[in-house]
Image (cartoon, grey):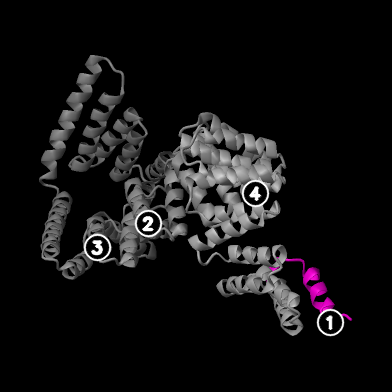
Amino acid sequence: MTNAQKTLQQATAAHQRYLLKSTTEDLSQAINYYIEAIKENPNQTSAYYRLATLLHKNGQIGIQSAIEQCYKAVDINPLDADAHMYLGYFLSLNSEFDKAKEEFKAAIKLKPRTCRTRLVLALTMLEKIKSAKEKNSDKVKDFTNALYYGITGTLMSLFDSCSIKMICENIKEDLNFVKYKAAGEFYEKMNSDKKAYNLYLNAVDNSKKSIALYERMAKIAIRKNRHDIAYDCINNVVILSNNDPMKIVSAIEYLEEYQKDKIDELIDYYTILANKYPELSKCYYELGHLYLKKDEKINALSAFKLALKYDEDNPYYQNSLAYAYVQLEQYDSAIELYKKALEANPNNEWSAVVAQALAAIYHQVKGNSEAAISMLENSLLLTKNKSQIYEAIADIYYDTENIDGAIEYYQLALSDDMENPKLFSRLAMTYWEKDCIEKAIIFYSKAIELDSTYEIAYNNLGVVFLDGLGDANRAMEYFKTAVEINPNYVLAQFNLARSHEVLDEKIQAAKQYQKALNLNKERNELDSKLIEERLYKLFET
């Protein structure tokens, strides 16, 4: 026996195992062996059409390529009945029914007692009747032929040893699966999940229906909160199903519910879906958000663009693409998309949030506070949750030194959210800017009352006592508390040093200034020159 013949035997054996068990390992082995067999002997016709069948089933080649492979096999050996049969099969898949019929008849002529070719020819005739616009007489003729080949093929299958063997193997396989499934379900009902899992695990390698077994194993693993095992089982289901879209969707749903941190795996699944269904815009939309989580801004931008390509008027896609543009500092493009999303207004509350994002660009990037405030005031008409919008307007007024406007809107924000320490702190700050010291103290104290760990409020209240009332001792207590809460708070460290300086405690002040200076080198909150100047002046005569 030559090497080519041995390789072909190995390919055939792997192919048969794949037909019985449907494992990707057997599929890969069969493909590789067939390729090797062709390299060793280019005249082995069976390798061509069997390889074409596997590659097409695996999605690696299209119908036209499979037809070309089968034509090559027929050219090498016109007397190979199976070559004609496989060629007829792929021609029928390509709706070339008349050519397919010729090839099937050629196969039957070469091998009259074959049942497979007759049955496939019968199915082809029926498919032709369904798809073709023929005269009634032609349809009757085709149906008669289909009936003839179907009956003769069925009768011959009763005496076809290969068919009988395959049927017996499948029956045996089905009975084994039913046996394992029944036993496993019994253990599961008896709350013996471990026994059920081990039973499925032992059966899975020898079962053609391993997909169903892996799915049951995954359910057990999920119940036991063993998500590492559950994911492996679910991923095996996807692989064994040859990336069946429904299995991929199930895998995505599992990950999004239980393992959201597996971003790369989610990206892989959505990418496979997008390749199978290029016009499914939701895939690209989800991919965009996954890429944003990985901080891959360019990939996110490309994904959102593809989503809009297939659904160009979708406001949610427009909003997400606008956000991606913001991350890349392409603000003009972001503004245009935010405007389009707002024009659609699919939901008032959602549109109010989009309006806030657009207002932030107008104010912080474009320096157009009037446009920003106008946008925010319009968004007030869309939402019941007005506190955040009032706060955003107040912040703009504060930044543009309209202190009265800031006070008005901070108070409006508080009227909707009286438990927000940040709002009390911001209102206190505006009163401090107006030299309303008593009100500043009242509102900073309220912020601290609501949040005893709010270091900014402690620091700012200390500043009011130190610089507004000249009470360094009282101020020092607030600065110390702020530093205890957050030792890395440079401004509080600096202000604590200032309070020591006012109390003429120069050694303590120097140590504290040095501490603030060292910390600021890492955090860069203040101008280091300011700290250095205060430190050096301590000991000037």
Residue where numbered disc 4 is placed: 328
- Residue holding disc 1: 539
Residue 99's place in the image compared with 395, above or below, is above
One can see residue 307 in this view: no
Q: Is residue 346 magenta?
A: no
**Cα separation between marks 4 and 2:** 29 Å
- Cα separation, mark 4 vs mark 3, equals 43 Å
Residue positioned 64% across, 37% down in the render: 373
Nearer to us in this view, 189 or 399 = 399
Residue 526 inside the magenta-drawn segment:
yes
Q: Which residue is mark 2?
A: 255
From the image, tell me which residue sits under label 3. 223
At mark 1, the secondary structure is: loop
Q: Which mark is residue 341?
A: none
Q: Could you tell me which residue is drawn at 71 percent across and 39 percent down?
A: 368
- Residue drawn where x is 68% and y is 68% of the image: 491
- Do labels 4 and 2 touch, CB within 8 Å? no
Name the amino acid type tagged 2.
Leu
Mark 2 vs mark 1, CA separation in Å: 64 Å
Q: Amino acid at mark 3?
A: Arg
Query: Earlier along the polypeptide chain: callout 2 or callout 1?
Result: 2
Q: Residues within 10 Å of mark 4 (few under 14, many from 20)?
A: few
Q: Which residues are magenta?
A: 522-541
Give the mark toward the camera: 3 or 1.
1
Mark 4: secondary structure: loop
Q: Position of residue 341 (x, y in %)?
A: 54, 34
Query: From mark 4 to mark 1, how far is it between C-alphas?
Result: 49 Å
In whole angstroms, how far apart are the C-alphas of marks 2 and 3?
15 Å
Q: Is label 4 in contact with label 3 (beta carbons under 8 Å)?
A: no
SS of the residue at dot 3?
helix
Say which element carries label 2. helix
